[in-house]
């Protein structure tokens, strides 16, 4: 069974940093793209960033220059380093996985739907 498990969420002040982790079980990242979505209250999931097995990446305009996605194949884990956090980054962050380029067609999506596998989500709160 394919599973994803997120960790690393929490509460920080504006300008602070957090690193989210997404660990996969039941599959490897070969020919798989992993992405991070986030859901602010009352909204659908918004695609934040993706990374493919060839290490190509995508970032939403709202996080470019502040967030960095990376993967450690030995640990079967994808990371999202979030720097210079803003109050508008407050959301539940989900990682998801599917075939390459699928998530690019779904920049906004109902959370935990349509994609092959989702994690359970981790909450990030940015507030002073």
Image (cartoon, rainbow, N blue to C red):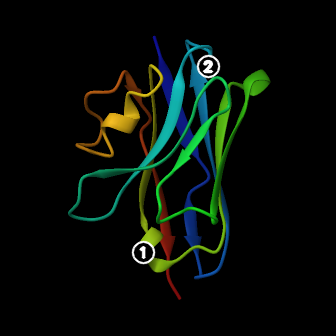
Left-right relation of 110 to 122: left
Do tag 2 and tag 1 residues touch (Cβ < 8 Å)? no
> How crowded is the residue under tag 1: few (<14 C-alpha within 10 Å), some, or many (20+)?
few
In this rendering, the answer to whether 59 lies above or below 25 is below
Tag 1, which secondary structure? helix
- Asked which quadrant contains residue 115, the reply is top left
In this rendering, the answer to whether 4 lies above or below 91 is above
Whichever of labels 2 and 1 marks the residue nearer the N terminus, that label is 2
Q: Residue at x 61, y 19 (%)?
A: 29
Q: Which of 8 and 94 is in front in this view?
A: 94
Q: In x, y percent, where is residue 62?
A: 47, 66
- Asked which quadrant contains residue 28, the reply is top right
The numbered dot on residue 68 is: none
Among all residues in the image, which is located at the extreme right?
74
Q: Name the residue under label 2.
A: 29
Instruction: Please state the total of marks drawn on the protein image.
Output: 2
In this rendering, the answer to whether 109 lies above or below 75 is below
Tag 2, which secondary structure? loop
What is the spatial separation of the Cα atoms under label 2 and label 1, in whole angstroms?
A: 30 Å
> How crowded is the residue under tag 2: few (<14 C-alpha within 10 Å), some, or many (20+)?
many
The numbered dot on residue 88 is: 1
Q: Which residue is drawn at 54% across and 41% down?
A: 6
Left-right relation of 25 to 127: right
Q: In x, y percent, where is residue 114?
A: 26, 27
Among all residues in the image, which is located at the extreme bottom?
128
Q: Which residue is drawn at 32% across and 63% down?
A: 40
Q: In x, y percent, where is residue 52?
A: 59, 29
Q: Which residue is drawn at 45% across and 11% down?
A: 1
Q: In x, y percent, where is residue 19?
A: 67, 55
């Amino acid at each position: 069974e394919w599973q994803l498990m997120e960790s690393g969420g929490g509460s920080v002040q504006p300008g602070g940093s957090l690193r989210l982790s997404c660990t996969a079980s039941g599959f490897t990242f070969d020919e798989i793209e992993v992405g991070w979505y986030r859901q602010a209250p009352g909204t659908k999931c918004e695609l934040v960033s993706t990374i493919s097995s060839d290490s190509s990446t995508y970032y939403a305009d709202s996080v470019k220059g502040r967030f960095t996605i990376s993967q450690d194949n030995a640990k079967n884990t994808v990371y999202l380093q979030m720097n210079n956090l803003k109050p508008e980054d407050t959301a539940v962050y989900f990682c998801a996985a599917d075939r390459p380029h699928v998530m690019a067609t779904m920049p906004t999506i109902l959370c935990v739907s349509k994609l092959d596998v989702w994690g359970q989500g981790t909450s990030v709160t940015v507030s002073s």
